[in-house]
Image (cartoon, rainbow, N blue to C red):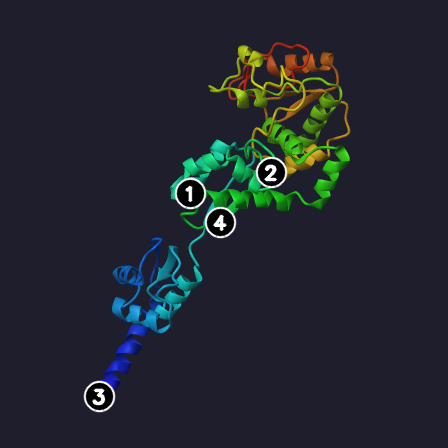
Amino acid sequence: MVALGVVAYQAIRWAEGPAIPPEAHPPAKVVVIPDGSTFQHVATSLERAGLIKSSFSFVLFGKLRSADRKVHAGEYELNAGMTPGEILALLLNGQVVLHPLTIPEGLTLVQIADLAAQDGLTDRVEFLRLVKDQAFIASLGIKAETLEGYLYPDTYKFPRPIKAREVLVAMVEQLKQVVGPDLLARMQELKMTMHEVLTLASVIEKETASGDERPEISAVFHNRLKKHIPLQSDPTVIYGLPAFDGNLHKKDLSSPSPYNTYRVQGLPPGPIASPGIQAIRATLYPANSSFLYFVSRNDGTHQFSATLIEHNKAVEKYQKRPVRRGSHSQTSVVPREGIVAHKEGIS
């Protein structure tokens, strides 16, 4: 019996040790534990991956610790230099692999859904259904037709797979964290709602990639709103088109879309993309200027003007020059009252 006891003790010590000595620096392996897996299935998967010496011993090890029904599903990064106890601790704590998801500023709901669905992170169809689900939107404390503009652009880390609902909640909550009390107070000072701020910020976001210009772009739109001049912003027109081929045509400026700010006065019905904090701040703190127009210089910046005469000269200078080899593409613009900018080109 003493001999059997010694053998049993040695067997337990053997089973509790790592499959490979840690000093050998075994490579990390990603093991996927499907939802609803039995502990036996988990142990078998670990043994097949060479991460533990014995599935039988691992199951016994788990039962002795009443851990066989507490393992969390998901992806785990493990290596054969870890002891069964260390592996079990990770499984019980749900320390799954987190995948980065970076959402750049200025993306639409569809574009964000495409990014979120890459590599099987979440369900694209469910994502696009929820962003228009009125009950779900209301549960987030948002009064809007969709979540366009409310999904804050940032880098997130999520387990894979993750429910679309959880991704959306995280993005909306991040927006609420970024737009703090100071910005909310400024909204009240300007008598603007969150929806209006996000709407104008999204237009500013789409109009320029230059952070330094955003307050000036904001000033142009604020000045136009005060003077009851249509915003005449190309990105809003593009957003409202059922299809866009990369070129904005003259006929598009007459489209009946509520997002056609050449025809509709004031802000469009809602955001046209997800604005970042710079665009949101620019919306709330526009530059102190009298500019009413701006036109692309074709280098990522814009020429601003206070009068139509100045604007037409700028259009003549920057938009009607012959295209030079190696330069940015030029656009053909008809100078007339109200044209603000033509980033995509009008044909």
Q: Is residue 292 above or below residue 126?
A: above
Q: Give whichever of discs 1 and 3 has the lower sequence position.
A: 3
Q: Give whichever of discs 1 and 2 has the lower sequence position.
A: 1
In this rendering, the count of numbered labels is: 4
Q: Which residue is mark 2?
A: 142
**Which of the pair 127/97 is nearer the observer?**
127
Disc sitting over residue 157 in the figure: 4
Residue 43: percent from left, percent from top: 29, 63
Q: Confirm whether residue 188 shows in the render.
A: yes
**Which of the pair 25/173 is nearer the observer?**
173
Q: Which element is circle 1 on?
A: loop
Disc sitting over residue 79 in the figure: none
Q: Give whichever of discs 4 and 3 has the lower sequence position.
A: 3
The quadrant in which residue 312 appears is top right
Q: Give whichever of discs 2 and 3 has the lower sequence position.
A: 3
Residue 270: percent from left, percent from top: 60, 28
Quadrant containing the N terminus is bottom left
Q: Identify which amino acid the numbered label 4 is placed on.
A: Lys
Q: Residues within 10 Å of mark 4 (few under 14, many from 20)?
A: few
Residue drawn at the location 72% of the way across and 27% of the way down: 219
Q: Mark 1 against mark 3, which lies toward the viewer?
A: 1
Q: Identify which amino acid the numbered label 1 is placed on.
A: Thr
